[in-house]
Amino acid sequence: MTAIRAYSNFYVIVIFALFYHGYFLDYFQIHPKINYAIGFLLYALVVLFYKNSILNMNKWLFYAVAVLIPSLLVGLGMGWSYVDISADVARYLALFLGYTAGLLLLKQLDYHRILYVLYGLLALQLVSYYSSVISKISYVAQGGPLVEYAKNGLEVQALYFFIVFFLLRNNLVGGVKKMLLFGYAVGYILNPVFLMSKARFMTMLLSIALIFVFYSKAKDRILIIVFALFMAGTSSLFINESAFDRFKDTIELIETGKYAADASTSVRVTEIINITNMMSDKSPYSLPFGFGSGALYYDDYSKIEGGLSQGNFRSDGGVHDVFTIPFAYVFRYGLIGFFLIYYFYLYSYKRILVYNDGTHQDTIAKSIKLFVVVSIVADLFVPVHAYGNLQFGFIVAMGVVLQSKFKTQNNSLKK
């Protein structure tokens, strides 16, 4: 009976992981907002009903709810849109909901079955990646541009890039698998150039820099430098200067100060100025809980002259979306909400230990720690990597549970 229950739990988690990864939902081409709502509901159902989990509520989810209650009340008192209030409540809660669901589900498995789930997701990611490579080749062969802003990119993610890197470095795979993983690493590096994306490019550079500084020996660093020079030289043969036009625009903005030189960057500066001044005007009352969930900012202090789609504006001229995530936290949830979420990042990061022994546990621990850092930094440019991301919380929980299971397994072996 115990064995049957263990296998039952395993398959429940495998199915959940597939939903978490989005393959089933993406297959049906559901609208992104409906897709997110289904995922959020799925996580909520797990937290509320899986094995009487409500009786053992995770403390972090409890803290998040406690922070959201005053933020919700402030938002209602300020008269913000119910839709925007609901969106901001869900996005703050998503990280903790994903984390709690991950803990509840993954604790039911032994160490190796959790590895099976994670490597299974890696295999699915490789399928998505090579499908996108084939689509890209077909698109270019039919006359489409190799470099195109925000279109026809490759399916790559930072977490799997880190796992791929450490699997290769620790010689844990060989043969065809090694070649497939190497191809994924190349795609992760080239994708930001293909998409002309400043945010992705900086995230990619940060990923390589963190590996270079913290997880590379002298020999590895030489190989990374040689590989980087090879990729730069090879890409320059196929990619024209237009791929870096958006970086030229940013340099022009710095030199001239003209908003129109780089509207994408300018609007981020503008939102910081407006939010800071709005907070200052209502200080100190605005500091504990901000302007509440659903808060809009207005360009009374620095005019918005482009860089935002019309869908970001509300009927009274206010703007809901905030790109620079630390300011979004303070503006919507106050300093209390800001410090809670960043303390959670630190707490989770420290609970995942690295052993530097070249094993699978070493590979996963390093990968998830780097993933946490890169996601938090990437949210400074586009707030979708950790903020409001159910998957991020699930992955962090996986790192924490794997650490606990690995420690228990080692202690049993010693005994």
Image: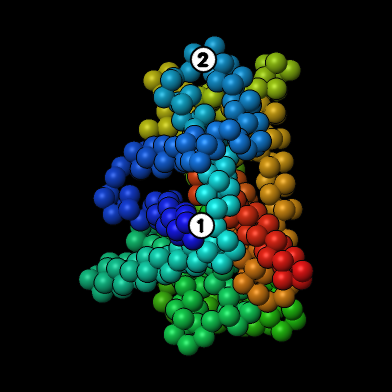
Q: Quadrant of the C terminus?
A: bottom right
Residue, disc 2: 76
State the image quarter where residue 408 is shown: bottom right
Picture quadrant where residue 324 is located: top right
> Quick one: 85 or 66, which is closer to the camera?
66
Residue 312, x across and y down, in percent: 42, 32
Q: Mark 2: which amino acid?
A: Leu
Q: Nearer the viewer, residue 176 or 385?
A: 176
Disc 1 vs disc 2: Cβ atoms closer than 8 Å? no
Q: Is residue 153 left or right of residue 398?
A: left
Q: Is residue 357 left or right of residue 308?
A: right
The residue that appears at 63% across and 79% down in the rendered structure is 170
Residue closest to the far bottom: 175
Task: List x then y, in percent, for residue 208.
Answer: 62, 68
- Outermost left residue: 142
Q: Which residue is mark 1?
A: 2
Residue 222 got which mark?
none
Q: Nearer the viewer, residue 191 or 145?
A: 191
Single out the mark in the foreground, 1 or 2.
Answer: 1
SS at mark 2 in the image: helix
Residue at position x 67%, y 46% in the image: 345
Dividing the picture into quarters, in which one does residue 361 lie?
Answer: bottom right
* Element under disc 1: helix
From this view, report whether residue 362 is shown above or below residue 23: below
Q: Residues within 10 Å of mark 1 (few under 14, many from 20)?
A: few
Report the label total. 2
Which residue shows up at 61% across the image and 36% down it? 56
- Answer yes or no: is residue 103 visible: yes
